[in-house]
Image: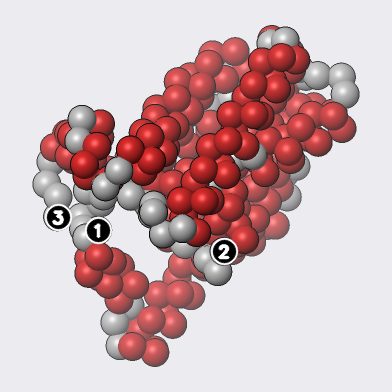
């Protein structure tokens, strides 16, 4: 669908297949087989973006609700489909009321998070218990100024391999920490070439959200929300790059994914 919208390819099925393979090679994909809510997050996020593109906003909001119910980072899905709706509205030159109406439907995606907050209130007496409990293992929003969080979360860790207790962890985390910035640059290219801006917003949010908590160790799971951008990558690789480069990208993805999975299962990382 994204390929058809961009008018950039002729063989949509092959791009869909490549995108699926590319996502399986995505370094965080091994989390989808773990006992975490990440699989629901990815399903809700991708489903929300897809349905927003097909103008089935009620269904898009339902998928977004699944994303927000699974993880708090799912709230990014609501913002993303809101940007998709805005871009469609600008192309249609519709009325302002039409935009507001569509945005209100998209906002229904917060129902999942609201339901979880209500559950926390009824079950434990504290609607924000899930957020407060994260402070027990180091995550906090009391880290102070945003720039200081950047220095603490990125700059210092780049030059302190001992923080990760070994070169194996250090190399993997460096790869992970570089991804949001690379994706942000990629989002700029997509916005400039195709006039599609939600990937750029999504890329920026993958940097802002973890930095707001003063802790980068969960970034490997935050970036799962980048799943809807995989087709864009393969559209551009197919059209602008040689097959050899496409193979290199897939090969590197497999290597990093297997390395991360091994480290996770062996208890060496994350």
Q: Earlier in the sequence, mark 2 or mark 3?
A: 2
Residue 43 % position (x, y):
65, 55
Q: Is residue 3 left or right of residue 130?
A: right
> Can residue 187 be seen here?
yes
Residue 238 or 126: which is nearer the viewer? 238
Mark 1 to mark 3: distance in Å?
A: 9 Å
Q: Is residue 269 left or right of residue 145?
A: right
Q: In this picture, is 177 found above or below 243?
A: below
Residue picked out by circle 3: 142
Residue 149 % position (x, y):
18, 40
**Residue at (57%, 44%) from the top-left corner?**
258
Which numbered mark, 2 or 3, is in the foreground of this view? 2
Quarter of the rendering occupied by the C terminus = bottom left
Q: How many numbered markers are drawn?
A: 3
Estimate how packed mark 1 is, as few (under 14), some (14 to 19) or many (20 or more) residues with alpha carbons within 10 Å. many
Mark 2 to mark 1: distance in Å?
A: 22 Å
> Can residue 93 be seen here?
no
Estimate how packed mark 2 is, as few (under 14), some (14 to 19) or many (20 or more) residues with alpha carbons within 10 Å. few
**Residue at (29%, 82%) from the top-left corner?**
126
Which numbered mark, 2 or 1, is in the foreground of this view? 2
Q: Earlier in the sequence, mark 2 or mark 1?
A: 2
Residue picked out by circle 1: 139
- SS at mark 3 in the image: loop
Residue 116 or 157: which is nearer the viewer? 157
Quarter of the rendering occupied by the N terminus = top right
Residue picked out by circle 2: 34
């Amino acid at each position: 669908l994204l390929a058809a919208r961009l008018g950039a390819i002729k063989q949509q099925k092959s791009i869909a297949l490549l995108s699926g393979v590319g996502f399986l090679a995505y370094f965080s994909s091994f989390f989808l087989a773990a006992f975490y809510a990440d699989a629901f997050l990815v399903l809700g996020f991708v489903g929300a973006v897809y349905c927003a593109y097909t103008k089935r906003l009620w269904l898009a909001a339902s998928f977004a609700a699944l994303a927000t119910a699974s993880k708090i980072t799912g709230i990014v899905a609501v913002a993303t489909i809101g940007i998709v709706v805005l871009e469609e509205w600008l192309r249609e030159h519709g009325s302002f009321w039409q935009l507001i109406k569509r945005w209100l439907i998209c906002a229904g995606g917060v129902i999942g998070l609201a339901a979880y907050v209500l559950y926390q209130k009824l079950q434990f007496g504290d609607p924000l218990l899930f957020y407060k409990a994260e402070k027990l293992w180091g995550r906090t929003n009391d880290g102070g100024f945003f720039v200081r969080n950047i220095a603490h979360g990125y700059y210092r860790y780049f030059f302190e391999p001992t923080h990760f207790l070994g070169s194996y962890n250090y190399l993997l985390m460096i790869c992970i920490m570089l991804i949001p910035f690379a994706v942000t640059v990629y989002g700029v290219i997509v916005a400039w070439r195709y006039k599609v801006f939600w990937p750029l917003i999504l890329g920026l949010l993958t940097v802002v959200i973890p930095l707001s908590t003063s802790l980068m160790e969960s970034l490997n799971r935050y970036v799962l929300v980048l799943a809807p951008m995989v087709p864009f990558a393969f559209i551009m690789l197919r059209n602008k790059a040689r097959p050899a480069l496409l193979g290199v990208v897939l090969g590197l993805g497999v290597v990093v994914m297997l390395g991360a999975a091994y480290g996770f299962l062996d208890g060496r990382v994350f």
